[in-house]
Amino acid sequence: MIEIKGVHKRFNPGSVNEVYALRGLDLSVADGEFVTIIGTNGSGKSTLLNAVAGEFQPDEGTIAIAGRDVTVAREFQRAALVARVFQNPFLGTVPGMSVAENLHLASLRGGAAWPRLGLTRRRREDYRDRVRALEMGLEDRLENTIGTLSGGQRQALTLLMAVMNAPLVLLLDEHTAALDPKSAAQVIKLTRQFVEDRGLTTLMVTHSMRQALDLGTRTIMMHRGQVIEDISLAQKRRLTPEDLLERFAELRRGEQLTDDMLDQLRRAYV
Amino acid sequence: MELWVGAIVLGLLYAFMTTGVYITFRVYNFPDITVDGSFTSGAAVAAALIVAGVNPLTGLLASLAAGAFAGAATALIHTRFKINGLLSGILVMTGLYSVNLHLMGRSNIPLLQHATLFTSLDAANPGLPGPVWSALALVAVMAAFWLLMSSLLRTDLGMVMRATGENPRMASANGVNVDRITILGLALSNGLVGVSGGLVAMYQGFADVTMGVGTIVVGLASVIIGQSALRVRSLGGQVLSAVVGSVIFRLMIALALYLGLNPIDLKLLTAAFVLLTLVLSQRVGKRQGKPFALAGPARSRWAWGLAVALAALAGWWALGQGPAPAPGPEAGRAKPLVGLIQLTDNALLDITRDSFAQQMRALGHVDGVNIRLDLQNAHGDLPTVNLILDKFIKDGASLVVAVSTGAAQAALKKVNDRPLVFATVANPFIINAGKSDTEHLPNVTGVYGWTPMDKTMALVRQIFPGPLRVGAVWDPSQANAVFNVENLKQAMAACPDLSFRGSTVAGSGEVYQAVQSLVGQGVDVLVLPTDNIVYSAFDAVVAAARPRKTPIVISDVERLADGALLALGYDYTSSGRQAARLADRILKGENPRDIPFERYESLTVGLNLDVARELGVAIPPEVMAQATLVHPAPQAAPGPAQEPAARAAAAATGRGKRLAIFLFADHPVVLDSLRGVQDELSESGALEELGLEVVVKSAQGEMALGQAIAQDLVRQRFDYIITLSTIALQLSSQFNETIPQVFGTVTDPYLTGVARSPTDHQPNLTGVATFQPVEAVIKNAREVFPRAKRIGMAWNPGELSSEACTMLARKVAPAYGFELVEANVTSTAEIMEAVQSLLIKDVDLFFLSGDSTMLSAFDTVAKMLHKARVPLLSNSCADIERGAFLSVGPDYYNVGRRTAAMALRVMRGEPTQGMPIESYVPETLCLSRALAAQYGVTLPDSVVGRAAKAGEGR
Ligand SMILES: Nc1ncnc2c1ncn2[C@@H]1O[C@H](COP(=O)(O)OP(=O)(O)OP(=O)(O)O)[C@@H](O)[C@H]1O
Ligand SMILES: [Mg+2]
């Protein structure tokens, strides 16, 4: 479903702020796979998701979704295939518009927006049913603006909006990180439910080792813009969060010596 | 009335623009400056097409397209090249200036001679006053527009637009092509701005390349004001507040004007007002915890209260700053205070007030010099009357003047320790001011008089002999009305074949029904005794009487033109004048106890022949012979407006005349000319002879202000208007169709569309055309510089008069063997470059004609040329002292005198229609000997002989 081959990305190339975020990343995700992604801070997880979503074009390499090369397609052109939920609950919805209007916007994904009154009473009823399934009591607040909702409610709605038009790929970037534990649990529950019901190909970034192991069919670990560990479902069953943490600790220890020295050498000689 | 309705009309026309600004500013969060350019583009396209004979509606659609095109350009620059939105707008706005000039082909397209949407609108007028009809029609259009816009924002497309504005990242992730939607939004917004520009051009009668300047500020201010005033969050409410904000904004300007605010302070007040609304809305938001929460009724009341308080404050301040500056406390003590109070905005009372003030001046009591005159109006609110009286007493008034029975009644109660003079009171005895003319309250005197109903009925009998049912309507709570009705009944009692039908009302709202019931009872004639309430609803009386063609007889001569057949009443001017004479005696030390009450001196009999014809009433010659005032005035040009009647009324009643001198900017040339006008007026003795009051109004170079002043002149029914400068003429001629107007300091009146030839001009205006003596300059230059080949000329294509000069120079220069080399400037910032570029092209001479952009940097230009030893030619002798070599100029002081002389002919009764436009160019040739010596030029004797002045120069 997703084929990423040799993708490189440098931000602010040539300036003092240059960041080499993706360094020849390869990743192949099969249809229906649910991949959880872990990695150190700044290892390029979000950048990977942004690359798939089309927020920028990679400097090198190709990205294909469902067999179509989308390397140069812009974000809105991929929106019919790819849906996403951001870490920031404020980003996924329009705060000044009502719940129903936001859902309606999501329903327009992949189609054209004409000047017609598309948000009909029947549509509203449909949205009400969908919102009811979130079990957050939002079915009575369809006309309230998003700005009046809590972060958890917003994130659940964003998730609902993301899966509304049956995308092929779902991208979740630490979408529960900004939530309180109770809301986070509810959103995770919904995530699992949506992904399993629809068999969506999913990439989910998380900082919770437990989540990474509990959820999904595969886990990858990223470091310095590359995938350094690819853990299959069978392996996942055997691993504990402690094992993963140990792996991180190892990385950090190693990093101090080798990477710093490597960097210095690179600067001096390359 | 016209002022306010006019302001509403303007507000509605500009509302398309403010809605556009709302879309970019609020929906898209995009600071779009393009508006200043696209507004003009809309106007330019519409005007150019209309002149080309295209249907105005098509023209307006083209305005929409032009605006949309401009907006799309800004959005494209912003999205494609990732250039900051503000900067993109500035770029497009700047570029549009040239585009607009190309579209128009010149800087100003007059539309006076062409049919516009407003011509069609007027044609469909069912008989309402013009501005009211326009306002009503526009309200209907605006309602439809509002519905369209608020539904549009609710559609799928609208939602996508709103999402793009509020959260572009989310929109993009949801498959919205953010760039394209931004382009669409800016195109829509500027399209609306273009429509607004097109409509304003049609309304004001011309498109001008500078008319868009400052539009964005007005738009933003309107949106902010509207939102704070309405405080509704629904989409419909938001769009509505943009519309309402636009209207409030125009009303604010009208208010400032109405208050006589110094126009210079208008901008400052606008800024302060917007700032305060912003701060207040924040405060209110914070107090409630949520900055943009839905406004409860309580809160909006709170906000309104503050706004009103603010407006009151501004008003108070403005009054203080107005034409009658409040003297300091020390100065004030020496000058006695005369407080005048009137009850309502009744036209009669206004006349009394104005004639009082004028007569006081004539008697040597000049406000701010030796007395303080405080003119107050309670606007029909009795509690306010008492407030005002309290204020007079608190301020230590030496004399109180009460105009109208209601005010006099309240004053009699409050004022007992100082003199009180009443005026325009029907019967002072029924309000217990005294028992007879000589036996009265010791501190009170005044002028009074009631309409002799017996004389009225005698005239009615002459017109309608035979048995007659007479109907009357009055408000029994009005003491003087009851008194007048009694008089009427007594006058009728003498004739047995007259029968009386009465109907009483409790407020002006019931007048229509009351008259309807009388008409239904089959009365033959309505005789309305003086009653302020009924008279204030006189339009309703006319409307109710129309179906059965029932004639109306009133006692208010001023309302004759509004649909009455016969008016018999006192002259309220004499009431004011007589009251002023009484006040004069009291101020000079006489005791009011010893001054008897006076009755009005003169009576006016007015006939409306239009109404007579309409009703099929034949006016017997003996009645005709008694008439002192006939409407429509016999000599006046036939026209639908009421002004001729008002004018005729003024003429017949001998009220002092008022002349307005309207200038567009305080430019030195215009001020020269103004001095000429003033000198001519005062030296001719006309001021005293005609009892002329002169008011000077300057628009300070501000187009919107100019429009408002032009409307205001018509509203105030000035008797004559003099306009100085081309734009003042254009603005004034658009709104003034009836007041005799004389223009001066105009280079080419034929370019403005008010005239086609000296004799073929708008009937109510004539004036003096002063072409710059361009040819004379070039001719003399040829004699002085026989070997010179090239004349350089820099000019601003945005100036209508400058354009005229340049075109003339282009024509004349080759005839004298010169080649004209031109450079354009659009602002003072470009002048040095332009002059430099011409110097590089080796010009032998430099000609600076009537271009005000160039003139504003005259010294700089002169210095540059002096350094390059290039002689400077100009069109004003004053320039010789500042470094010109040779000048042939019209002497604008004398142009002003000539203009005033023409105006005097008009004031002495000559109709403007028959007066051809005069071409008057008082040419004066001036030379600089100093420069001639420096440059080694020998001045030919022939030229020196012609020169009025061969100055030393620099
Ligand atoms: N748009 C951008 N411009 C410049 N630098 C960027 C941009 N996006 C990401 N980076 C840099 O690229 C590197 C990788 O960032 P990324 O957000 O992908 O890390 P991450 O793995 O998601 O980290 P975290 O766990 O903190 O979310 C970081 O150093 C970041 O600062
Ligand atoms: Mg991240």
Image (cartoon, coloured by chain):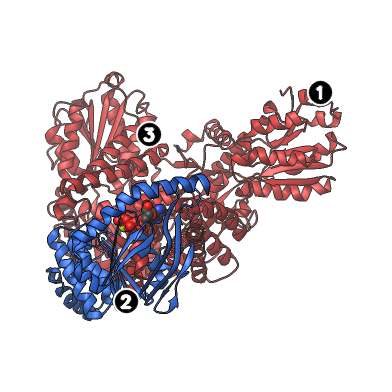
On the same chain, marks 1 and 3? The answer is yes
Instruction: Return the mark for residue B323.
Output: 3
Give the image location of residue B646, x and y in percent: 40, 52
- Seen in the picture, residue B251 relative to B178 is either above or below; the reply is above
Real-space Cα separation, disc 1 to disc 2, in angstroms: 89 Å
Q: In which quarter of the image is the C terminus of chain B?
A: top right
Q: Earlier in the sequence, mark 1 or mark 3?
A: 3
According to the colouring, which chain is blue?
A
User: Residue at point 18% right, 41% down?
Assistant: B384
In the image shown, does B409 or A43 lie closer to the viewer? A43
In the image shown, does A6 or B295 lie closer to the viewer? A6
Q: Colour of chain B?
A: red
Instruction: Return the mark for residue A167.
Output: 2
- Seen in the picture, residue B641 relative to B788 is either above or below; the reply is below
Q: Quadrant of residue B830?
A: top right
Give the image location of residue B494, x and y in percent: 18, 58
User: Closer to us: mark 1 or mark 3?
Assistant: 1
Give the residue type at disc 3.
Pro
At numbered mark 1, what does the secondary structure look like: helix, strand or loop?
A: helix
At numbered mark 3, what does the secondary structure look like: helix, strand or loop?
A: loop
- Which quadrant of the figure shows ligand 1? bottom left
In the image shown, does B468 or B922 lie closer to the viewer? B922
Q: In this view, does A29 lie to the left or right of A24?
A: left
Give the image location of residue B90, x and y in percent: 50, 51
Check the residue under mark 2 and report the chain it is in. A
User: Residue at point 37% right, 43% down?
Assistant: B257
Residue labelled with disc 1? B933
Real-space Cα separation, disc 1 to disc 3, in angstroms: 51 Å
On the same chain, marks 1 and 2? The answer is no
